[in-house]
Amino acid sequence: MKIYLDIYGVLVTMDERPAEHVADFLRFATEHFDCYWLSTHNHGGNNTAVSYLLRTLPKGLEPVLKKIQPTAWWAAKTEAIDWDSDFLWLDDNLSEETDLELAAHGKRTSFVLIDLVNSPNQLDEVRQILASRVAQNKL
C-alpha cells in the first residue's frame, strides 16, 4: 500500500511545530509502506520536503525522511496519485473538486482528513490503524 503525505497540517502544525507523534508515525509508515510526499513542497516538480522538515522536525529523522519518495504535480495534487494502487492519502484539506475526483475513482475511503487542532493525537491513531492492517496481513 502507498501512503501519500501532506506536510502542513499533517506532519507539522500550521504554526510550524512538529505534530504530536510525528516521529513514531513516520518511522512506522516508512518501515511498512511505500510513502510519497504530496504537498506544496512538490508543486511544479520541486522536491524541498526533506530539507524543510529537517529544519522543523525532531533531530535524527533524516534517514526516515529520505525514504519518502517525491511526487510531482502542477495544477492539482491528484495528478500525482496512482489511482490503480491501494493507498491512503493524509491531508488537512479536502476540496469539493478533490472529493469528486476521489469518488469518481472509487477512492473516497482512501482519503484521511487530518485535523491536528481538534485531534492532536490523530497521527498516533492512524499509526495504530495501520499497525492493525500490518498485523492482519502477517497472520
Image: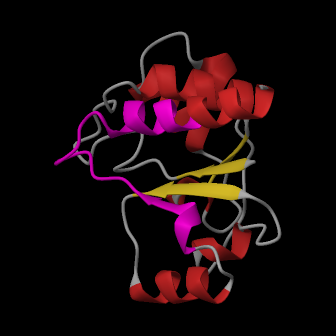
- The image shows a total of numbered marks equal to 0
Reply above or below: 89 against 59. Answer: below
Magenta-span inclusion, residue 32:
no
Q: Residue furthest left?
A: 118
Q: Quadrant of residue 28?
A: top right
- The stretch of residues the image draws in magenta is 108-130
Residue appearing at x 73%, y 49% in the figure: 2
The answer to whether residue 112 is visible is yes
Residue appearing at x 70%, y 76% in the figure: 79
Residue appearing at x 37%, y 67% in the figure: 93
Looking at the image, residue 105 sits to the left or right of residue 14; the answer is right
Q: Nearer the viewer, residue 2 or 55?
A: 2
Residue 114 image offset from top left, x and y in percent? 36, 53
Reply above or below: 98 against 11. Answer: below
Q: Quadrant of residue 96?
A: bottom left
Q: Nearer the viewer, residue 127 or 46?
A: 127
Quadrant where the C terminus sits is top right
Reply above or below: 67 against 27. Answer: below
Q: Colour scheme in the image?
A: secondary structure
Residue 123 image offset from top left, x and y in percent? 40, 36
Residue appearing at x 69%, y 33% in the figure: 136
Looking at the image, residue 59 sits to the left or right of residue 38; the answer is left
Residue 19 image offset from top left, x and y in percent? 33, 33
